[in-house]
């Protein structure tokens, strides 16, 4: 695992698999898509937990706080959230914007196979229906590969966001200062009662097929 990846608490092996530091030691390509069953707060590798997380609330509720290898913002894992981590060979230009377009496109296509309309890429790394965020994502560029990580809000308890996360230190312009409850939504809330297991399966299939067909390069 990454050095200092645990910020607070005693995370389980399941949480470690969602965070996916171990993928950095494996040869590309690798794909892992998992429904979450336990609550945890996941920070990017570079932001300060004291600013991005209500640490006292997490400690009180015995919610672990951990870091993932990639960037982006803090997220809350829990039942109804699905994560995908994909380690892909990178032989083309090291262009982060192009990588977001490519990999977020795979997430959107996986959800389209389940009946969800095409999602719009907004604020660099979010996938949205209208102005409401459904998917957050982040990359990490390595020497010859890229790690892409995303979390999909399928039927999550959004009250956990207000409980464990303050307003973030950095937010996209389209958020317009909205609190969590007015900014994010779930597939269930917008009328798509899809199971987390179905979403995980669709994501794994889409990413595996894409990386197998073209080597995963950007």
Image (cartoon, rainbow, N blue to C red):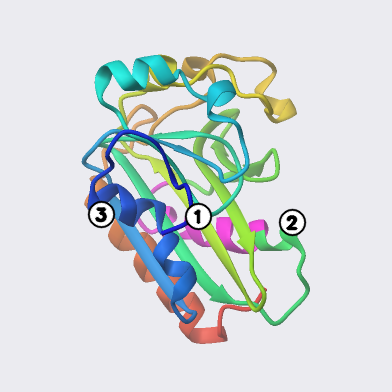
**Residue 97: numbered disc:** 2
Image quadrant in which you'd find residue 102: bottom right
Q: Which residues are magenta?
A: 100-116
The quarter in which the N terminus is drawn is bottom left
Q: Which residue is mark 3?
A: 198
How packed mark 1 is, by other alpha carbons closer than 10 Å (few <14, some 14-19, many 20 or more), is: many
Q: Position of residue 177 (x, y in %)?
A: 66, 15
Residue 163 vs residue 174, the one in the foreground: 163
Which element type, helix, strand or loop, lies under badge 2?
helix
User: Is residue 174 found inside the magenta-colored segment of the image?
Assistant: no
Horizontally, residue 28 falls left or right of residue 189, namely: right
Judged by depth in the image, the label closer to the viewer, 1 or 3, is 1
Label 2 packing within 10 angstroms: few (<14), some (14-19), many (20+): few
Give the residue drawn at x 51%, y 62%: 106
Q: Seen in the image, is 109 located left or right of residue 57?
A: right
**Where residue 121 sits in the image (x, y, percent)?**
64, 45
Vertical order, 21 against 44 (above or below): below
The residue positioned 29% from the left and 62% from the top of the image is 201
- Per the rendering, the mark at residue 149 is 1
Q: Earlier in the sequence, mark 1 or mark 3?
A: 1
């Amino acid at each position: 695992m990454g050095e200092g990846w645990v910020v607070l608490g005693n995370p389980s092996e399941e949480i470690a698999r969602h965070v996916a530091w171990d993928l950095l030691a494996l040869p590309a390509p690798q794909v892992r898509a998992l429904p979450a069953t336990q609550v945890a707060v996941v920070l990017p590798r570079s932001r300060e937990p004291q600013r991005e997380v209500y640490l006292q609330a997490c400690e009180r509720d015995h919610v672990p706080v951990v870091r993932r290898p990639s960037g982006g913002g803090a997220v809350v894992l829990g039942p109804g959230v699905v994560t995908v981590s994909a380690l892909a060979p990178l032989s083309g230009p090291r262009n982060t914007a192009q990588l977001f377009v490519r990999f977020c496109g795979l997430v959107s296509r996986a959800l389209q196979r389940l009946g969800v309309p095409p999602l719009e890429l907004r604020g660099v790394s979010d996938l949205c229906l209208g102005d409401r965020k459904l998917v957050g994502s982040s990359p990490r560029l390595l020497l010859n590969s890229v790690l892409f990580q995303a979390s999909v809000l399928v039927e999550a308890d959004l009250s956990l966001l207000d409980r464990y996360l303050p307003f973030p230190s950095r937010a996209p312009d389209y958020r317009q200062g909205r609190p969590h409850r007015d900014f994010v939504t779930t597939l269930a809330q917008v009328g798509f009662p899809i199971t987390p297991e179905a979403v995980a399966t669709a994501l794994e299939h889409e990413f595996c097929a894409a990386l197998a067909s073209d080597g995963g390069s950007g």
